[in-house]
Image: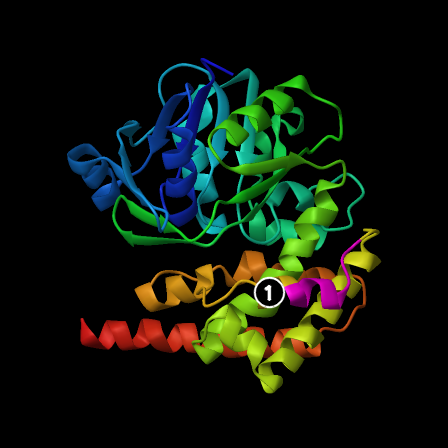
Amino acid sequence: MAGLKICVAGVGALGGTLAAMLARTEASLSVVARGATLQALHENGLVLDDGQDRSICHPIADTRAPDCHQDVILLAGKSHQLPQLAETVRHAVGRQTLVIPVVNGLPWWMATDPNGAFEAAAPVLDPDGRLSDLFSRSCLVGAVAYAMTEQTAPGVVSSARAPMLVLGMVDGMPDDRLSHVLHVLQQAGITARSSPQIRCDIWNKIAANLATNPLSVVCEASLSTLAGAVSTEAVIADILKETLAVGTACGLSNLHDVDEIRDTIAKAGPHRTSMLQDYCAGRTLELDAIGWTIAKIGQAHDVPMPVTSTVLELATFKAAQRVQAQGIRS
């Protein structure tokens, strides 16, 4: 749809890729960034390398969203960055704005679902209730992203294949606004579809992330390496079983089976998980949103997760060692 005002808040690997692809459409595009990334956007534009072409676009870039209501706001930061990102866009949220948090792990809005199935995660994901206060559930769109992206430098991103987004209204109600967004995403070359069971789609992705992201840090290995070794393949299968059991205990149905998710992981190729990318770059790991929140939910539903917890402990230890080593060097 021509004229949609879209703001992408967070110009990392995924956010940068989505913004660069949306720049191909007639949408009025803006991005929220800071520091070296914002400087690079002002000086050089946003660069996307998709393996075949290298494109440059020049979206409106600032430390906050434009001073007018947006039609769509994509929150594309890490889970622990969301409260700060939310403050940069809150003034741009109007009655017709759709807010789409594209995050790894459990989104805060699932932790505050009325049925209480995921409430054990709320103190971690939205401890002061700020996100729930800022965004009405009627404007929220659940999202699952399947992407193979990396940020190779500030303002420079690469994508091994076109991202896929699965979207669904959090309140479960049909909404013409979402149809318009899907149309624009598809125009941009992004594979996009709607889902009437977005919580199940999110949990399937959580299972895949939890089975691979922390393990990739412990082993410092790509997805294809993890999926191809007998020892790590067995660990992946155990974590998938435990995570899917938690989802079932929470009342989710039609979840993928272990073999289906393992096949998806195996097809990812020599891609580094986002958590491994963060570890190698010395950034904070999303162990809470991707891992520990799920363990807390499992504990609340009396579902044991021994393998998952062990791998999370190892990843937590390794991340702490990296932080300590950086402190010593500095």
Residue 141 colored in magenta in the image: no
x, y percentage for residue 298? 74, 64
The quadrant holding residue 144 is: top right
Q: Is residue 98 visible?
A: yes
Give x and y (percent) for residue 128. Answer: 55, 43
The relative height of residue 30 versus residue 55 in the rendered view (above or below) is: above
Residue range in magenta is 255-263
Image point 43% across, 46% down: which residue? 14
Residue at numbered disc 1: 265
Residue at 83 percent of width and 59 percent of height: 249
Residue 43 in percent (x, y) is at 15, 35
Give yes or no for residue 257 being in the magenta stretch. yes
Amino acid type of the residue tagged 1 in the rendering: Ile
Q: Residue furthest left?
A: 43
Q: State the SS at label 1.
A: helix
Residue 58 at x, y percent in the picture: 26, 29
Kindly identify the residue that appears in the image at 60 percent across and 35 percent down.
132
The quadrant holding residue 7 is: top left
